[in-house]
Image (tube, rainbow, N blue to C red):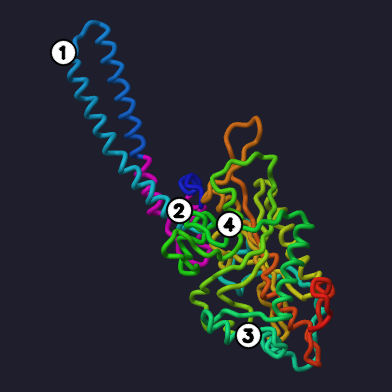
């Protein structure tokens, strides 16, 4: 959520930054609502002051000998009753304006960082670096990962579709073991890097999704349990960040670094026709997520470290990838700055996103009311939140199957995964 004071005091700056995003955002209705609310606040303060003044005058006159039924006392009491009635009328008006202002604020995306490249869409993203070109396979007859998996008998989509619907998969035998190995490997590496592991609920309430920015804008992307105020999580970012919702942390508790493995659930609304086969775009998929809550002055460096922690998994697996800095027209709704890691898929001769590492600044913290307090100092500050995939497990498996496939139809197991699987080839 954006700071209403910032919008009020720097509307031109806010308009300029929002204009660089992909979408149209009008802050004028919000400013008008804020002006109305502030006008009502001033009127309420004036009435309260007059009400207090009337009370004092009545008390003074009573002490001076005036009687309760004196005309002057009665006139003051009548005015006091009128003031109370006006205050009573103002209260629901203020509440309604507050609701409307919050609704408007929740619809606005984050402001891009000053260092985020300005661009209209993904074609104007900036490639930062590449790694691992020497590990790209070059032998002929490279197959897409779903064909490899089906030939090895480790993936079944037809039976999974029978159980649920399209874009669900079932992993069998070595496929299930490889998925489990990847999860364990990722968690081991990230906990060794200093992240505290969390195993959170897979169902969260509306307030949780609102705090991290999925609601109200992306309701159509999530699976809702309609008989309860519960939603299946689209990513562990939601429950892990919300562990600290409505809390004031001690400054010495920061930074907080968490990692979490969870299944994730997304409708992928509007994406039909893209990646309909394989492990790239599923309704249910596994992911290891990295979440940070940090002090504002350290968030930029924490962001760079988060990206490096995600890269370390790809490097250990010897999977070629590149780092992309997203431009203002392509960053997510809540992000101020974002880097995508894209892994090489040789069957398509292209890089595909495998991790999105975002710095949200205080955007999520304002929505979730997550603050910290310095000992001995007045007031509190909002934390900065960051997160990124470390990594998307299914997409990592797809990259392993394609980059490690052999001319004889087998798939070599990356060396770092062999202890988890007890084998060197599929």
State the residue position of label 4: 239
* First-in-chain label (3 vs 4): 3
Q: Residue at x 42, y 58 (%)?
A: 26
Cα–Cα gap, marks 4 and 1: 64 Å
Judging depth in this view, the residue of 48 and 128 nearest the camera is 48
Circle nearer the viewer, 1 or 2: 1
* First-in-chain label (3 vs 1): 1
Q: Is residue 115 in view from this perspective? A: no
Query: In the image, residue 299 lies at what x, y percent?
Result: 68, 51
Circle nearer the viewer, 3 or 4: 3
Question: Compared to 58, does 347 lie above or below?
Answer: below
Q: Are marks 4 and 2 in contact (CB under 8 Å)?
A: no
Cα–Cα gap, marks 1 and 2: 52 Å
Judging depth in this view, the residue of 159 and 375 nearest the camera is 159
Q: Are marks 3 and 4 in contact (CB under 8 Å)?
A: no
- Residue 187 among magenta residues: no
Which disc, if any, is residue 156?
3
Q: How would you rate the neighbour count of disc 1 (Cα within 10 Å): few for under 14, some for 14-19, many for 20 or more?
A: few
Specify start and end residues of the magenta stretch as a single range: 11-38
Circle nearer the viewer, 3 or 1: 3
Q: Residue at x 22, y 5 (%)?
A: 65
Query: In the image, residue 398 lies at what x, y percent?
Result: 70, 79
Q: Residue at x 81, y 76 (%)?
A: 414
Circle nearer the viewer, 4 or 1: 4
Cα–Cα gap, marks 3 and 2: 45 Å
Report helix, strand or loop for mark 1. Answer: loop
């Amino acid at each position: 959520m954006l700071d209403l004071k910032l919008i009020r005091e720097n509307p031109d700056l806010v308009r300029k930054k929002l204009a660089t995003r992909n979408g149209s955002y009008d802050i004028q209705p919000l400013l008008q609502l804020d002006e109305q609310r502030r006008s009502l606040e001033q009127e309420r303060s004036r009435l309260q002051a007059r009400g207090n003044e009337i009370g004092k005058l009545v008390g003074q006159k009573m002490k001076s000998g005036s009687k309760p039924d004196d005309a002057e006392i009665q006139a003051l009491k009548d005015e006091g009753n009128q003031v109370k009635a006006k205050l009573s009328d103002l209260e629901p008006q203020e509440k309604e304006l507050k609701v409307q202002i919050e609704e408007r604020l929740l619809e606005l995306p984050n402001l891009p960082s000053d260092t985020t490249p300005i661009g209209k869409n993904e074609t104007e993203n900036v490639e930062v670096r590449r790694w691992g070109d020497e590990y790209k396979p070059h032998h002929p007859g490279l197959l897409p990962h779903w064909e490899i998996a089906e030939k090895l008998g480790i993936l079944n989509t037809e039976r999974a579709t029978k159980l649920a619907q399209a874009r669900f998969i079932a992993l069998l035998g070595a496929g299930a073991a490889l998925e489990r190995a990847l999860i364990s490997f990722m968690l081991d590496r990230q906990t060794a890097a200093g992240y505290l592991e969390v195993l959170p609920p897979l169902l969260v309430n509306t307030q949780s999704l609102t705090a991290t920015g999925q609601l109200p804008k992306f309701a159509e992307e999530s699976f809702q349990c309609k008989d309860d105020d519960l939603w299946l999580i689209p990513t562990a970012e939601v429950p892990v960040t919300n562990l600290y919702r409505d809390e004031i942390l001690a400054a010495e508790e920061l930074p907080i670094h968490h990692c979490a493995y969870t299944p994730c659930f997304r409708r992928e609304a509007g994406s039909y026709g893209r990646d309909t086969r394989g492990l790239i775009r599923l309704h249910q998929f596994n992911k290891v997520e990295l979440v940070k809550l940090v002090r504002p002055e350290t968030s930029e460096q924490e962001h760079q470290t988060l990206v490096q922690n995600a890269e370390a998994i790809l490097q250990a697996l010897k999977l070629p990838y590149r780092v992309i800095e997203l431009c203002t027209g392509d960053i997510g709704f809540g992000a101020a700055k974002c880097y995508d890691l894209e892994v090489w898929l040789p069957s398509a001769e292209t890089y595909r996103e495998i991790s999105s590492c975002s710095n949200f600044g205080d955007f999520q913290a304002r929505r979730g009311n997550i603050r910290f307090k310095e000992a001995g100092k007045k007031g509190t500050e909002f934390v900065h939140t960051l997160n990124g995939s470390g990594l998307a497990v299914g997409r990592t498996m797809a990259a392993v199957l394609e980059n490690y496939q052999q001319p004889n139809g087998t798939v070599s197991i990356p060396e770092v995964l062999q202890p988890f699987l007890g084998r060197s080839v599929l």
